[in-house]
Image (cartoon, helix red, strand yellow):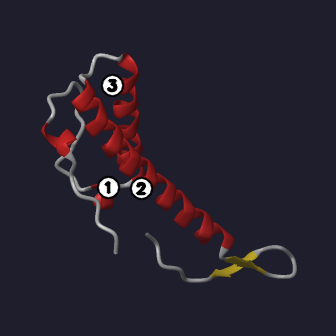
Amino acid sequence: MRRCFLTPVARLPHSGSMDAAVAIDEMSFEDALKELERIVARLESGDEPLDNSIALYERGSQLRQRCADRLDAAQARIEAIRLDSDGRPVGTTSFAAG
């Protein structure tokens, strides 16, 4: 299993309540997306020094991948639903969620 470790952004002063104490691979989709949105806003503001911007970008990239992985897992789950001859769901196929 791939592990996402905290980048230097965890030590950056910041506004908002970015929870850098939570490892990315333990975040829910919703929490990862909220943090990613906060990072994008900080980067778009243009107020961050270069080193902070790079660290934010790295963490944002990891968060984006986490969100993409969770969406892919959700799509696989939806596609795994089996339908009967009338088009009604009759069960699901198990899968390993990321």
Give the crowd class for mark 1: few <14, some 14-19, many >=20 residues within 10 Å.
some
Q: Is residue 89 left or right of residue 17?
A: right
Q: Are marks 3 and 1 in contact (CB under 8 Å)?
A: no
Disc 2 residue type? Answer: Arg
Quadrant where the C terminus sits is bottom left
Q: Are marks 2 and 1 in contact (CB under 8 Å)?
A: yes
Residue 30's spot in the image, x, y percent? 41, 47
Q: Earlier in the sequence, mark 3 or mark 2?
A: 3
Q: Residue under label 2, please give it.
A: 66
The residue positioned 41% from the left and 43% from the top of the image is 33
Compared to 93, does 20 lie above or below?
A: above
Query: Residue 81's image quarter?
Result: bottom right
The residue positioned 61% from the left and 63% from the top of the image is 75
Q: Residue under label 1, please give it.
A: 27
Q: Secondary structure at mark 1?
A: loop
Q: Is residue 15 left or right of residue 29?
A: left
Taking depth in this image into account, of 23 and 9 the one nearest to the observer is 9
The residue positioned 34% from the left and 69% from the top of the image is 2
Which marked residue is nearer to the observer: mark 3 or mark 1?
Answer: 3
Q: Residue under label 3, please give it.
A: 42
Q: Secondary structure at mark 3?
A: helix
Residue 9's spot in the image, x, y percent? 21, 39
Q: Secondary structure at mark 2?
A: helix
Disc 3 residue type? Answer: Arg
Residue 73's spot in the image, x, y percent? 53, 66
Compared to 44, does 92 lie above or below?
A: below
Report how far apart the C-alphas of labels 3 and 1 lie in the structure: 20 Å
Taking depth in this image into account, of 18 and 45 the one nearest to the observer is 45
Q: Is residue 59 left or right of residue 96?
A: left
